[in-house]
Image (cartoon, helix red, strand yellow):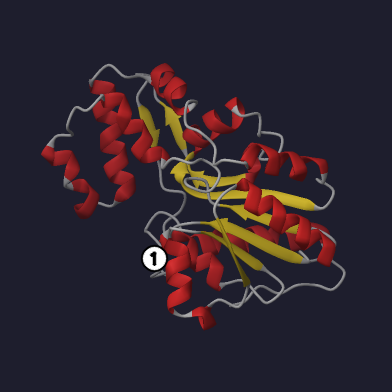
Amino acid sequence: MAVKHGSTAKRTLLAFDFDHTICEENTDIFVLRLLEGKELPEEISVLRKTAGWTKYMQAIFEFLHDQGIGGDAIRAHMQRAPLVSGMVEFFQHIRLNRDTYDCIIISDSNSLFIWYILHYCRLEDIFPSNSVYTNPARLDEDDCLRIEYHHQNSTCRMSADNLCKGRVLEEHMDRFHTQHSQHYQSIVFFGDGMNDYCPSTRLGTADYVAARKGYKLLDKINQDPAKVKAGIVPWTDGKDLLNFIHNFEKSL
């Protein structure tokens, strides 16, 4: 179902994936570098296919803990994950125009990884905790990272069991409408991977999908362009996105 827009809305929603979109790395893969080349046990590796990604990652976090790698080491490591080139300048522009934009993150990473990176890069003013939709994570009393599903998905075949980004996007827009009695004038979804396809198909003709070049989302859209009604914005780095947002603002 395409998103509906009210003619009196004055704000634009910028909805971001995180890995390979804001952060250059896949954070779940990046954390494995803490093992310094040590192989995962076979009983953990098979979970990726038999139990799903989130349970696979939980087993990895437990293995890291068994190797003596605790919360402080994980935090310090994640803070070395680079942002996509040009994103600092892009978000500086967004920061200067906060009266125009609402910003959210919808990610299949986890809340601790995202918070560590946002806080270190001083982006938490743009993305306060209530604007980040992801798998909840915490450090338990033994300093082992624990992760939970964001929600249970049993209806969207395009999405994983733990997160349907399209559902999260629509729920956020419904809350905005309830609180402000208006709809966003436009929505821009920024992503790269296959799990970004579902929200892309839910947008309308007033919206945009910024799909990163060289990644699966853009390839998927190009296979059947008619299924995505939003305008498509291929991009490589934050400079491309800043150019797009300047042109977008001129069109308002």
Residue 188 in the image: above or below residue 48? below
Give how far across and how far down residue 122 sits, in percent.
66, 29
Task: Report how many numbered discs are placed on residues in the image.
Answer: 1
Q: Is residue 213 found left or right of 124 in the rendered image? A: left
Residue on which disc 1 sits: 154
Whether residue 136 is visible here, answered yes or no, is yes
Residue 229 in the image: above or below residue 111? below
Report helix, strand or loop for mark 1. loop
Q: Which of the pair 238/172 is nearer the observer?
A: 238
At label 1, counting other C-alpha atoms closer than 10 Å, the crowd grade (few under 14, some 14-19, many 20 or more) is few
The residue furthest left is: 42
Q: Quadrant of the C terminus?
A: bottom right
Q: Is residue 26 found left or right of 123 in the rendered image? A: left
Give how far across and how far down residue 78 sits, in percent.
45, 28
Give how far across and how far down residue 173 sits, in percent.
68, 62
Amino acid, disc 1 = Ser
Give how far across and how far down residue 203 sits, in percent.
62, 71
Q: Which of the pair 159/14 is nearer the observer?
A: 14
Q: Which of the pair 27/216 is nearer the observer?
A: 216
Q: Is residue 246 found left or right of 39 in the rendered image? A: right
